């Protein structure tokens, strides 16, 4: 059984109008949300062994804070291909993931990440998770999928959870 975790970057800061979109850091609220999501991954034993992370500053910072909570550090690849990527582009990156990885975490951006999550949510998906996904996929939201097969053939999966920072209390 494979596990796919789609994590939208945490809330970014707009304080410096001179910064380009790629270089925006996390806001204070984002710092806390990323740490909380990392702790939640550990609490639920949803530990990735591979992470694909957009090279943008806010996604790298989100990953850094999540990874700091993990008991072991997975392999990580930072890639420009996930920045401003469509659902199809993100799925293409997933298809290229190391076949030996059983649990993959992707840290990326909307709208591509949300579009991919909705596209992947196949039959057998949890109704509550699907409803949350359809309502809103805010910053630092995490969608968890499980499926049988290889990364290269992923086209549909079972959505088991959709967590938002506000759900973590």
Image: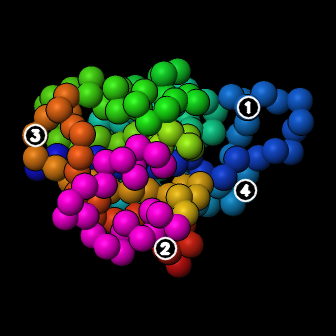
Which one is earlier in the sequence, the residue at label 3 or at label 1?
Answer: 1
For label 2, the SS is helix
For label 1, the SS is helix
Pair 3/4: label in front: 3
Determine which residue is flagged by label 1: 21
For label 3, the SS is loop
Residue 93 placed where, x, y %?
35, 26
User: Spatial distance from mark 3 to mark 4, Cα to Cα?
Assistant: 39 Å
Residue ranking furthest to the right: 17
Within 10 Å of disc 4 (Cα), the crowding (few <14, some 14-19, many 20+) is few
Looking at this view, is 18 or 145 the one in front?
Answer: 145
Number of the label disc, if any, that sits on residue 168: 2
Looking at this view, is 145 or 40 the one in front?
Answer: 145
Residue 81 placed where, x, y %?
48, 22
Q: Give the dominant element type of the magenta stretch: helix, strand or loop.
A: helix
Give the residues in magenta.
114-135
Determine which residue is flagged by label 4: 28
Which one is earlier in the sequence, the residue at label 3 or at label 4?
Answer: 4
Q: What residue is shown at x 58% (from left), y 58% (from top)?
A: 138
């Amino acid at each position: 059984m494979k596990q796919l975790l789609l994590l939208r970057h945490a809330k970014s800061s707009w304080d410096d109008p001179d910064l380009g979109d790629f270089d925006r850091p996390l806001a204070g609220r984002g710092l806390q949300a990323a740490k909380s999501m990392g702790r939640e991954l550990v609490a639920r034993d949803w530990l990735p062994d591979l992470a694909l992370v957009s090279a943008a500053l806010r996604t790298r910072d989100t990953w850094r804070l999540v990874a700091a909570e993990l008991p072991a550090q997975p392999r990580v690849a930072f890639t420009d291909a996930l920045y401003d990527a469509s659902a199809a582009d993100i799925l293409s990156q997933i298809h290229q993931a190391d076949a030996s990885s059983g649990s993959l975490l992707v840290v990326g951006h909307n709208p591509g990440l949300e579009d991919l999550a909705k596209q992947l949510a196949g039959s057998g998906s949890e109704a509550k998770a699907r409803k949350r996904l359809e309502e809103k996929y805010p910053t630092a939201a995490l969608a968890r999928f499980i499926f049988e097969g290889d990364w290269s053939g992923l086209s549909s999966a079972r959505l088991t959870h959709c967590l938002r920072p506000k759900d973590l209390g």
